[in-house]
Image: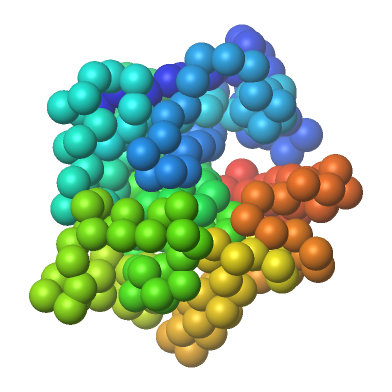
Amino acid sequence: MHGLLWRPRPGAVESDGASGSGAEPPLYVHIHGGPTGQSTADWSARIAFWVDRGWAVLAPNYRGSTGYGRAYAQALAGCWGEVDVADVAAGIRHASRRGWCDARRVAVAGGSAGGLTTLMLCALHSDLVRAGVSMFGVADLFDLAATTHRFESRYLDRIVGVLPGDADRYRERSPVTHAARVEVPVLVHQGTDDKVVPRTQAEALVDAMRSSGAPVEYHVYEGEGHGFRRSSSIRIELERTEAFLRKWVLLR
């Protein structure tokens, strides 16, 4: 797996002890969307936000990401929700083995397709992850196939499978199916006007997690769609995320 790593400056200290002299920093895993997209080595305000607060940031470019050749990008065919999850889990293990982070303080976060990978990691790899953050994340592949916009119509045929024959794949790789298995805290951000991943997906996931007793925090942003646009929404989302990770990752 490929990926990018940002490390906080030596001695960086977050207000609640995110990092410090002689301590390995907590790890914020930033999972890109797409899923056929990529994290790039350019300036990102979001990544800078976390690095400045003493976090190491890992941005995995799992199989299926662009930028590494045709074969690598096509490796996601029929495997979304499987190889991306396995690759990110491998990246977290590698970062821990190399001493790039504190293996006891790992958070995963992603929006849209990255939200699906985040949620699947929380369900299937709770040994690696202390908390997860989903921003308008895909929770139900059946619903996505039925409601997605025309630009991505039939996209799931290639990266998951063709319905109804591949229904088992859709079910097994939908985070809502595994909601009862999630043991780590999850924060969910969702816009009311999202036409790509409707609010109903987030609510079905949150309801299923609450029914099983899983710790989940849910926030809805009025007038926001698939990707927040208002500076006020982005500020509030970051503030809520920082408070959530401070509670469940840094102070545990």
At x 60%, y 66%, the residue is: 195
Q: Is residue 126 left or right of residue 57?
A: left
Colour theme? rainbow
Q: In this view, does 75 lie to the left or right of 106?
A: left
Residue nearer the viewer, 146 or 80: 146
Give x and y (percent) for residue 24: 50, 24
Residue furthest to the bottom in view is 211
Residue 61 in sight in this render = yes
Give x and y (percent) for residue 207: 53, 85
Residue 251 in sight in this render = no
62 versus 68 height, above or below: below
At x 46%, y 84%, the residue is: 208
10 versus 191 height, above or below: above
Q: How many labels does the image show?
A: 0
Give x and y (percent) for residue 179: 39, 75
At x 18%, y 46%, the residue is: 77
Residue furthest to the right in view is 232
Residue furthest to the left in view is 165
Image quarter of the N terminus: top left
158 versus 177 height, above or below: above
| Quadrant assignment, res 165 | bottom left
Residue furthest to the front in view is 150
Give x and y (percent) for residue 220: 73, 69
Residue nearer the viewer, 195 or 222: 195
At x 36%, y 39%, the residue is: 36
